[in-house]
Amino acid sequence: MNKFLTVDAALVLVLLGLGAAGWWWSPYFLPQADVTATPVAGCDLHQGPCRAILSGEGGEGGFLELSIEPRPIPFVKPLSVTVTFSGIDARKVDIDFSGRDMNMGYNRPPLVVESPNRFIGGATLPVCITGKMAWKATVLVENDQGQRIVAPFQFE
């Protein structure tokens, strides 16, 4: 009977540890936004860059712009990603590609500074076996004040 109690206690400790690790790492996988940037309606990333207007505390008057090349955006080929800013001092920028209706795994390449208001990087979209795929490209920005700015762009 003592053996089963020890095993049960070990399982409870493992589950508590996993729960604590999930809580600790959740902001990395599901970042919270201090400022939300709203994409301009009607923009198509397959046609050209798309702009999102910053709103919320500390975001008034600024925007960010996302460009993905080549166009139209292909699957399983190298992509060039560019994010430019106005009205914000970004210190870190990532872009998170996720399926809108289907989990396509973790795909969040960091971007590097090309100039003070321009970050660049590369990415690749995995192929979807079901055919047409709805994607969400979320630009994740952290500024010098520690604010997190999130701008979600959608495309197929």
Image: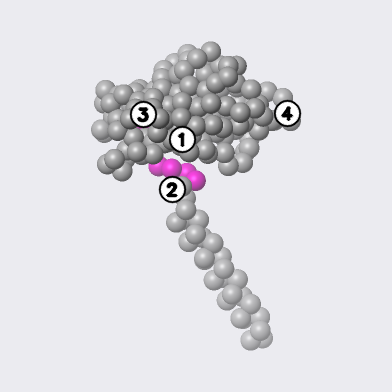
Disc assigned to residue 27: 2
Measured in 3D between alpha carbons, the distance from the residue under mark 1 to the one under mark 2, in whole angstroms, is: 19 Å
Q: Which residue is mark 4?
A: 130
Q: Earlier in the sequence, mark 1 or mark 4?
A: 1
5 left or right of 23? right
Measured in 3D between alpha carbons, the distance from the residue under mark 3 to the one under mark 2, in whole angstroms, is: 27 Å
Q: Which residue is mark 1?
A: 111
Q: Nearer the viewer, residue 40 or 91?
A: 91
Q: Residues within 10 Å of mark 1 (few under 14, many from 20)?
A: many
Measured in 3D between alpha carbons, the distance from the residue under mark 3 to the one under mark 4, in whole angstroms, is: 39 Å
117 left or right of 82? left
Q: Earlier in the sequence, mark 3 or mark 2?
A: 2
Q: Position of residue 90 (x, y in %)?
A: 34, 35
Q: Secondary structure at mark 1?
A: strand
Name the kind of residue labelled 1 in the image: Leu
Name the residue furthest bottom: 2
